[in-house]
Image (tube, rainbow, N blue to C red):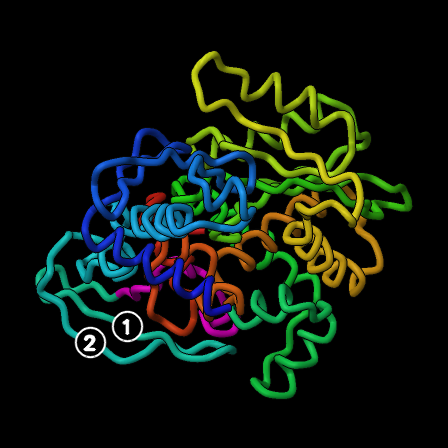
Amino acid sequence: MRTTNARKLRATQLLAHNKVEMINDSTFRVLSQSGQSSYIVVRKGLNWVCECADFEFNHVICKHIYAVEQYSKRLRRTIPVEVERFEELCEPELICKYCGSQNLIKRGVRKNKSGRVQRFSCKDCGKRFVVNVGFEKMKATPQVVTVSLDLYFKGISLRKIVDHLRQFYGIKITHVAVFKWIKKYVQRIKDYVYSLVPDVSGIWHSDEMTVNINGELQWIWNVMDNETRFWLASQITEQRQTIDARNVLAEARSIAKVRPLAVVTDGLHAYERAIRKEFRTMRKPRTEHIRVPNIRNRSNNNMVERLNGTVRERNKVMRGLKDKETASTIMDGQRIYYNFIRPHMALKGKTPAQEARIDADPERNKWLSLVKRACKKNGNPNS
């Protein structure tokens, strides 16, 4: 342990004296402390390899590798990324919806069965209206709708959500209406969040799991980023063929806008050809395929397998899915919840979206802010 700490201390000293130089995404040059020689550190799959004697003969993580790991993490956090700030997207413009005037005053509230909504009056045209971005023409308040979304993706059944709303909010609603809210707002948020580009690492994990859809077993494919835990892609298929594996990898690439350095999968042979076809290139570094055929392998795919467990917990409550369309809606909602709503212990309480630098939302009701941001970005549909 003391030797390891000493290497980490020397690595920090190397960084402090600007001894690390990036050659490409997977190759770095580290100058010696004397400055008279240098060592090449290369990423191979999940691990780093150095040409120094400490690494080659002692088979340990040397100070040069520690320096490169610290440098690459620091680099990811300092490269500027165009992040749409919450303040720019969430706050609605207080202008008259009829004449565009900003000469407004508050004029009472509009009451309905579910609560109150602030009403405004325009001094120029004399008309009254409400500003309720994303929830226009809804009988339920935004708080009730977003509470329902949050409870559902936390694993609560539709009928239990109905009972919760009746007990604590005095609202009488059917489980069918709650599911309509889920379909409507998952689609609206999905169109927005899929347009964002996460700042992910070069290592992705992919795995597949079975799901019961209308009494038939089908496959859910998931792809997750290694460092940020960002859930990149998910697809439902009837088989496990090469084209199925390739489609989910293509979706992950379209979201991330980059080609990974390595993809970690289980022993399914469909992945080998899919990765070769989807990420084939003559330029180095090429995408490496790391197969984990059994649990004894040094590398592992536990990260995405834990994600599969989260999906199973949600589906267990539903006891199967009625059709593929419903399954797709649920999976899209789970991805939104996993990436933008749920804090992760491995990320020190941050969400994957925050770790991937596409969400800096300080508000407590993240569902509400996502709806507002989506409507602001997509033109605020009044339905």
**Magenta part of the protein: which range?**
129-144
Label ID, residue 336: none
In the rendered picture of this protein, how many numbered marks are placed on residues? 2
Q: Is residue 110 above or below residue 370?
A: below
Q: Is residue 251 above or below residue 306?
A: above
Label 1 Cα crowd, 10 Å radius (few <14 / some 14-19 / many 20+): some
First in sequence: mark 2 vs mark 1: 2
Residue at the disc numbered 1:
119
Q: CA distance from mark 2 to mark 1?
A: 6 Å
Q: Nearer the viewer, residue 320 or 344?
A: 344
At which x and y percent is residue 35?
Answer: 21, 41
Identity of the amino acid at label 2?
Answer: Lys
Which residue is situated farthest in the top direction here? 282
Is residue 98 shown left or right of residue 71? left
Question: Which residue is located at x 8 percent, y 61 percent?
Answer: 124
Q: Identify the residue at the far right of this view.
A: 215
User: Can residue 375 be seen?
Assistant: no
Q: Is residue 134 magenta?
A: yes
Give the image location of residue 208, x and y in percent.
Answer: 74, 41
Front-most of 14 and 80?
14
Q: Residues within 10 Å of mark 2 (few under 14, many from 20)?
A: few
In the displayed structure, does residue 251 sit left or right of residue 321? left
In the figure, is residue 326 to the left or right of 376?
right
At mark 1, the secondary structure is: strand
Query: Per the image, is 131 magenta?
Result: yes
Can you say whether 41 is above or below 280 in the image?
below
Residue type for callout 1: Arg
Q: Going 52% across and 73% down the picture, which residue do you hit?
A: 144
